[in-house]
Each structure stands twice: as C-alpha cells, then as structure tokens.
Image: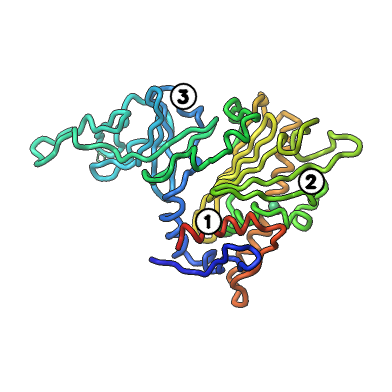
C-alpha cells in the first residue's frame, strides 16, 4: 500500500507528519514491514551468547527470531520450523542442536536440518536442502543487534562513527545490571518524538531542568542517528545533592555523557562507567512498550540495597512518569478533529524533524 504525505526537508518550511500516522493501524503495519523489518534492532545482550550453543529468542516486527553462538560466529535465524511452522527455540538457554517444539525436527547450529523423524516415503524431500532462514546479527560492545533484511547495510555502517565517539566509555566492559518495563497508551512515535527534543524539559521535567544547562542543550543529527548534548549545570555547593547522573569531575560534557538515538527505536544513554539502553516497541497503534536496561562497569552486588542506584532509579522513574503523562495526553489529542499537523522549532526540534525525515524516506 503506497503512502504519500508532503514533507519539507528544510525544517524552517516543514510541517510535522500527519496525525493519522499516529492513530491509524494501517500505518503501523506499514512501519513493521518497511521500518522495523529493515533496520537494526537491539535484541539482546552479548553475555547471553558467550558459549557455543547458548541462544536467546526475540521478536522483530512480529517475527520470532533466535540468536545463537556457534564458536566464533554469532548466528541468527527466523524461529520458524520448515515443517509446519513450529518454533525451534523457546526462551533462552544452551543446546547442541535446535529441536522444534512441535514434532521434533532437529537443526544444527548452522541452521541445517539434520533429523526429521518418520518422513520416509516423502517425494522430493532431502534433509540437505533444508535450512532455517537466516537473518543478520551483529554485536557491538555488550549489545546484540539483528536485522531481518539480509540486504540491509551492516551494523557498523548503520552505527557510523558512534563506536569511535563512544570508545572512551568502554561499553564492552560494562555488565548488565537490571531491566525495567513500562507500557504506555500512545503510539511509539509519540514517545520517540518526545525523547528527541529538550524543548519540553522546562515544563514537563522541572526537576531535571534544575540540573541541566538548558541553554546549551542541542541535538546533532547524522544519517541514521542523532546525538543530544545535554551538559549539566555547574553545581554550587554539594555535588552529591545532584539527582542526575554519576557526577564526573572533569572533561567536556561530551566526555562525560552522550545520548544517542538510533533510527527507529533505540536510545543509548552512555555515561562514564554506566549505560542505559531504551528500546521502544509498538504493541498496537496506541500502545507502546518501553524497555529500559542498565549496565555498569562496576555493578552493585544488590541494586535494591545500593543507595546510589536507588537514587538514580528513583529519578529515572520520576522523569519517565512525567514523559508518560504528556505522551498519553498527546496521543489522545492527535485524534482531535481540529488537529492534523504542526510546525517545528528550528532551534529546539531539529532532532524530531530528522526522525520524521527518515520516516518519510522509509515509508513513501
Ligand atoms: S513444525 Fe517443526 S517439527 Fe513439525
Ligand atoms: Fe522527557
């Protein structure tokens, strides 16, 4: 189904995307196919697939996938048995082979069918012709990404210069700490739009506003990612009273914290010694799952008992709740009969305009 909407590549002349893209399920289907089915998705962690045979399952655009370790190689397949579409893996774990959970057809770690019981006498049936359908997988630091589209450019091209820019954070040395999920009653793009600008901070996040240098806040768009610069306000008095972030003493703001967004739905908030990933997944046209995961160079033995982490999580939760409230209110209003498209602040919403340009590029 073709979709057309006018979109101005210059932010000063542009109007925001039509509200039907946030409310009509037709567009979600199109996004699953053209965006989520063709871009790199953050699907798991490197520590889940360290030893040969270790695997985990995930979902991309409604497709089940399985990612596994086979010696030096990380492999990914559609989690769909060639017999009658059973699943060849469930959850996560470690196995020498993948055995379908329906009738037991068995595949090796390269995805070749090696055993199909009681199939004697079937015409034109040979095990050696049958292989699980592969997908692309790649690792960066502690993160594992997958792409359903075998023709999509490799992950390193998609990440562009991020691994260099973020090198001093040494994210490959960070270890998983914890996960938190929130379900929101809004379209996934409402949440992404909101993340991509600091324009709403003074009104929606008064607590955060006190701690960042709002005037210096800016967004730097690249091809498939953008980077937000949000320097902290210099503290007078006790730095320990800051709620926001591990206090770092020296270096430029960029050395201390970087906030990346990767098209279409991944955020990486990287700090010295700590990282948070957010993955934003559509559950329906007006329902969205946000998954937050924390990593640390020095994970606490017990998060709940650790004062620094407790404070950090409380502050993160407070900001998330403020964002949820505004996103849900906006979703309701996007259905209003009097609203269709708005305009962008050239100074403050270039990140949103960049996201919408990519949507326009992928959808039309
Ligand atoms: S569906 Fe997999 S063995 Fe039948
Ligand atoms: Fe926000």
| Residue closest to the eye, 328 or 341 | 341
Q: Which secondary structure, mark 2?
A: loop
Q: Along the line of sight, which residue is nearer the eye, 125 or 230?
A: 230
- Compared to 150, does 73 lie above or below? above
Q: Residue at x 59, y 27 (%)?
A: 175
Tell me the number on the disc at residue 296. Answer: none
Side of 168 where 203 appears, left or right: right
Above or below 173: residue 76: below
Q: Residues within 10 Å of mark 3 (few under 14, many from 20)?
A: some
Of tags 3 and 2, the one toward the viewer is: 2
> Going by the picture, which residue comes out furthest to the front?
10
Label 2 sits on residue:
212
Q: Residue at x 77, y 58 (%)?
A: 203
Cα gap from disc 3 to disc 2, whole angstroms: 39 Å
Disc 1 crowd, CA 10 A, few/some/many (<14, 14-19, 20+): some
Q: Is residue 180 visible?
A: no
Residue at the spot of label 1: 358
Quarter in which the N terminus is drawn? bottom left
- Measured from the top left, where is residue 150 in percent x and y? 36, 43
Tell me if mark 2 has few (under 14), some (14-19) or many (20+) residues whose alpha carbon lies within 10 angstroms of its own. Answer: some
Distance CA(mark 1)–CA(mark 2): 29 Å
Can you see residue 317? yes
Q: Looking at the picture, how far across and down is residue 334, in whole percent?
A: 60, 68
The residue at 57%/66% (across/down) is 8
Q: Nearer the viewer, residue 54 or 225?
A: 225
Residue under pointer 3: 50
Q: Earlier in the sequence, mark 1 or mark 3?
A: 3
Front of the two marks 1 and 2:
1
Could you tell me which secondary element the residue under label 3 belongs to?
Answer: loop
Say what secondary structure mark 1 lies in. Answer: helix
For label 3, being within 8 Å of ligand 1 is answered no
């Amino acid at each position: 189904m073709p979709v057309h909407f006018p979109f101005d590549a210059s932010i000063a002349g542009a109007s925001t995307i039509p509200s039907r893209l946030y409310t009509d399920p037709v567009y979600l289907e199109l996004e699953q196919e053209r965006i989520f089915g063709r871009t790199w998705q953050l699907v798991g962690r490197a520590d889940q697939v360290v030893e040969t045979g270790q695997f985990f399952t995930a979902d991309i655009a409604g497709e089940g996938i399985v990612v596994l370790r086979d010696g030096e190689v990380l492999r990914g397949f559609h989690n769909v048995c060639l017999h009658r579409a059973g699943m060849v893996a469930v959850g996560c774990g470690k196995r020498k082979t993948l055995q379908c959970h329906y009738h037991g057809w068995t595949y090796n770690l390269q995805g070749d069918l090696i055993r199909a019981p009681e199939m004697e006498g079937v015409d034109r049936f040979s095990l050696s012709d049958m292989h699980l359908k592969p997908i692309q997988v790649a690792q960066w630091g502690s993160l594992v990404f997958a792409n359903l589209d075998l023709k999509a450019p490799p992950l390193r091209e998609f990440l562009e210069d991020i691994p260099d820019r973020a090198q001093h954070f040494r994210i490959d040395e960070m270890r998983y700490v914890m996960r938190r999920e929130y379900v929101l009653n809004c379209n996934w793009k409402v949440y992404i739009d909101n993340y991509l600008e600091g324009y709403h901070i003074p009104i929606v996040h008064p607590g955060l506003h006190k701690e960042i240098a709002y005037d210096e806040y800016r967004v730097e768009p690249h091809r498939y990612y953008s980077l937000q610069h949000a320097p902290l306000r210099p503290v007078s008095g006790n730095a320990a009273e800051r709620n926001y972030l591990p206090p770092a003493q020296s270096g430029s703001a960029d050395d201390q914290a970087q906030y990346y967004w990767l098209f279409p739905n991944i955020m990486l908030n990287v700090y010295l010694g700590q990282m948070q990933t957010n993955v934003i997944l559509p559950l329906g046209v007006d329902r969205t799952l946000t998954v937050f995961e924390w990593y640390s160079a020095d994970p606490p033995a017990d998060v709940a008992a650790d004062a620094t982490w407790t404070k950090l999580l409380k502050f993160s939760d407070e900001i998330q709740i403020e964002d949820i409230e505004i996103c849900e209110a906006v979703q309701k209003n996007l259905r209003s009969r009097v609203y269709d498209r708005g305009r962008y602040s050239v100074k403050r919403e270039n990140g949103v305009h960049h996201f919408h340009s990519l949507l326009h590029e992928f959808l039309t």
